[in-house]
Image (cartoon, rainbow, N blue to C red):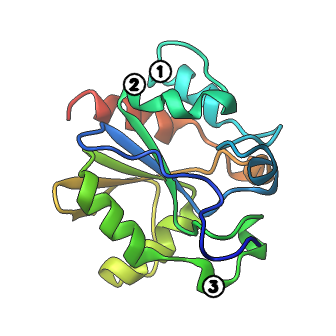
Amino acid sequence: MRGLTEPILPDILEPDLRIVFCGSAAGAASARASAYYAGPGNKFWTILHKAGLTPRLLGPANFKELPDFGIGLTDLAKHASGSDASLPAEADDPAGLHDRILRCQPALLAFNGKRSAQVFLKNHAGVRTVDYGLQRWTIGKTTIFVLPSTSGAANGFWDEGPWHDLAHHAKTV
């Protein structure tokens, strides 16, 4: 874990984005590469394109280009990296995520995996269990969506259906 003064990966946030994706924290490969979703088994970049959220296939090196497509990136734990199971609870910053989303007000906040969504929604709305898909809670005008994790470690839970649902929903906002 790096020191608590600088984030592992920079936020890719600006006003009026269509979607901001939020993971738990940078994975080990992403921390080493200084790029989001850089693990060799991660499906993030492939599903963005396959679901129609980007017009071409991008990769980890392209993460700073995502605002050109109305997409932003952040993590619940900005100062820790590794697998969900290795993250210390004190690394999570649901209040910080809430503040970042309120400042940039994207149309959608999409959690890439249930863990980050559960931690955030427990803090934000007292929610104990979370299902995939559109949620009834908001952050200001930002709608919340929960997706199956694209991490290679979560292959047993992979279902691209909610990702296509998100893409369809994003066209209506």
Is residue 154 found left or right of 25 in the rendered image?
right
Q: Position of residue 35 (x, y in %)?
A: 68, 42
Q: Give the vertical position of 114 relative to 30 (above or below).
A: below
| Quarter location, residue 49 | top right
Q: Position of residue 137 (x, y in %)?
A: 25, 65
Give the position of the C terminus as an image quadrant.
top left
Q: CA distance from mark 2 to mark 3?
A: 33 Å
Q: Which residue is mark 3?
A: 89
Q: Residue at x 67, y 29 (%)?
A: 61
From the viewer's side, name the closer residue of 42 and 90.
90
Q: Going by the image, does 51 lie left or right of 36? A: left
Residue occupied by mark 2 = 69
Point out which mark residue 54 bears.
1
* Side of 108 relative to 27 (left or right): left
- Determine the secondary structure under disc 3: helix
Rounded to the nearest whole Å, what is the CA distance between mark 1 and mark 3?
33 Å
Direction top: furthest residue: 56
For mark 2, give the secondary structure: helix
Occupied quadrant, residue 8: bottom right
Quarter of the N terminus within the rendering: bottom right
Coordinates of residue 141 in the picture (x, y in percent): 16, 55
Residue 62's label in the rendered image is: none
- Label 1 or label 2, whichever lies nearer to me, is 2
